[in-house]
Image (cartoon, grey):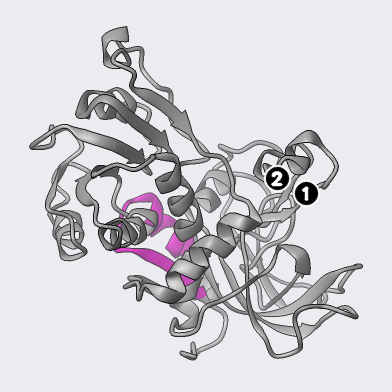
Amino acid sequence: MHALLLDNPGAPLRMARMPEPVAGPGQLVLRVRACGICRTDLHVADGELPHPKLPLVLGHEIVATVEDAPPNSRFRSGDRVGVPWLGWTCGTCPYCLSGRENLCPNARFTGYQLDGGYAERTVADERYCLPLPPGYSDAEAAPLLCAGLIGHRALVAAGDPSRLGLYGFGAAAHLVAQVARHEGRRVFAFTREGDDEGQRFARELGAEWAGASTEAPPEPLDAAILFAPVGALVPAALRAVAPGGTVVCAGIHMSPIPSFPYELLWGERVLRSVANLTRADGEAFLDIAGRVPLQVATETLPLAQANEGLARLRAGRVRGAAVLLPEPASVRL
């Protein structure tokens, strides 16, 4: 099969022929139908996340068809499944035993410690694969598996805000904005300065205000979620939220956070992060996606153009989510 390999952080991905994957105990053999290009892929490829498996097949927003399943599997050959970031946990540590498997210190992640979906085929532990809702094409379903999942976890962590700010309006924010509007929340979107197209996109999806991240919103926010991995936005978001408000950092990596005066945190404001996801997160969000017809904006590229897709994401030139298609057609179910 063909796959894109990361040989070393900072190096371009290399197209290679690899042996067909062989399933281990409890694993599915999967034919990849689509794989999203996530900002976490950039962090791994650029060396901002340490100690990846090398050589590595990136990609953790995988839509795939089951080709072979273990005995007594809940999946059958031909099923369409999703493979998310969380690929394995130990099941025995205090975090796993208390419903917090996302914090398992022994966890292995797809496209980081486990080979991912920038390939024609892959294998995955069936326990961590997710049934996908109908009504979404392969390309549309792929961003649900990380941008959607981590965005939803961040929205839950934000509490119950009436006025929600979203910093960085990309793959995750454009999905979260729609869920938030469905829940009756008011959405305020922040983009890079001068990103008029991004601000128009946010307003099209229900944001009542959109402006640059250097601007103050027209009124105080109850919560803000930071998807942009820019540490300088933390004090800006704290300034934007009202007393008692929450700022959630939703990325896996962020540039250094500058010092800020305590008065920005005072007033019972909360600054927190979200880390990874649980299988319960996946089931909850995909249930929502099955009931709420989300508009998933995608830009598709063939597998061989993965380096171009990463470069476009790095430069902020993707509207919604970029998705790789190993095959020429993506079928809507």
Numbered badge on residue 206: none
314 within the magenta span:
yes
Direction top: furthest residue: 262
Local crowd size for mark 1, using a 10 Å CA cut-off: few (<14), some (14–19), many (≥20) = many
Mark 1 or mark 2, which is nearer the start of the sequence?
A: 1
Q: Tell me the quarter of the picture where residue 115 sits.
A: bottom right
Horizontal and vertical percent position of residue 268: 34, 18
Cβ atoms under marks 2 and 1 closer than 8 Å: yes
Horizontal and vertical percent position of residue 144: 48, 66
Residue of label 2: 101
In this picture, is 264 found above or below 101?
Answer: above
Direction left: furthest residue: 218
- Camera-nearest residue between 159 and 295: 159
Q: Residue at position x 22%, y 23% from top? A: 239
Image quarter (top left, top right, bottom left or bottom right) of the N terminus:
bottom right
Numbered badge on residue 89: 1
Q: Tell me the quarter of the picture where residue 326 sits.
A: bottom right
Q: Amino acid at mark 2?
A: Glu
Q: Is residue 112 left or right of residue 288?
A: right
Q: Residue at position x 57%, y 60% from top? A: 282
In this picture, is 121 found above or below 274?
Answer: below
Q: From this viewpoint, is residue 219 visible? A: yes
Horizontal and vertical percent position of residue 17: 74, 74
Cα gap from disc 2 to disc 1, whole angstroms: 7 Å
Q: From this viewpoint, is residue 301 visible? A: no
- Camera-nearest residue between 199 and 270: 270
Q: Which residues are magenta?
A: 307-324
Q: Amino acid at mark 1?
A: Thr
Q: Residue at position x 91%, y 67% from top? A: 25
